Amino acid sequence: MRLPTSIELKKKSRILAIEYGDDRYELPFEFLRVFSPSAEVQGHTPDQAKLQVGKRDVDILEILPIGSYALQIKFSDGHDSGIYSYDYLEELGKNQESLWQANLEDSAGASRDPNDPANKRFEEPPKKKCPGHH
């Protein structure tokens, strides 16, 4: 595992800049949110993966180091369960263009903008409450 030599959160441009020696990657907040490694997003098997839509305006509120191997990223939409290993972040950086292109193709018909009615069909239905629980 290569450890990053620099990690910089650029709030204005919504970029997480991460360097591994001579390799530098600029990962947009939206890209990081869409490719969260959490089970909530990825599922436990590939067919359980959940398409992430409407994340264009997502912000990163906080980044917490997890030991010496990963970062936990807290996003403005409430998502915070993804643990991004330094290996995973490097893979995202190396493959950013192809991953993003595949995501755009997968989400045809959805919008990157939050609150777009086109995204409704990609959202989970509300969980039903058990009788007697509020």
Image: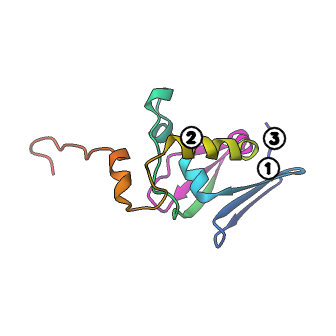
- Disc 3 crowd rating (10 Å Cα; few below 14, some 14-19, many 20+) is few
Residue 36: in sight, yes or no?
A: no
Task: List x then y, in percent, for residue 44.
Answer: 47, 29
Image quarter in which the N terminus is found: top right
Identity of the amino acid at label 3? Arg
- Disc 1 crowd rating (10 Å Cα; few below 14, some 14-19, many 20+) is some
Q: Nearer the viewer, mark 2 or mark 1?
A: 2
Q: Nearer the viewer, mark 3 or mark 2?
A: 2
Instruction: Looking at the image, tell me whether mark 2 or mark 1 is earlier in sequence order.
Output: 1
Rendered image: mark on residue 4: 1
The residue carrying mark 3 is 2
Q: Do the residues labelled 3 and 1 touch (CB within 8 Å)?
A: yes
Marks 3 and 1 sit apart, C-alpha to C-alpha, by 7 Å
Question: Which of the two residues, 63 or 79, is positioned nearer the viewer here?
Answer: 79
At x 64% / y 73%, what residue is drawn? 12
The residue carrying mark 2 is 37
The image quarter in which residue 83 lies:
top right
Instruction: Looking at the image, tell me whether mark 3 or mark 2 is earlier in sequence order.
Output: 3
At x 80% / y 45%, what residue is drawn? 3
The question of residue 67 being in magenta is answered with yes
Residue 25: in sight, yes or no?
A: yes
- Residue 36 located left or right of residue 67: left
Regarding mark 2 in the picture, which secondary structure is present there? Answer: loop
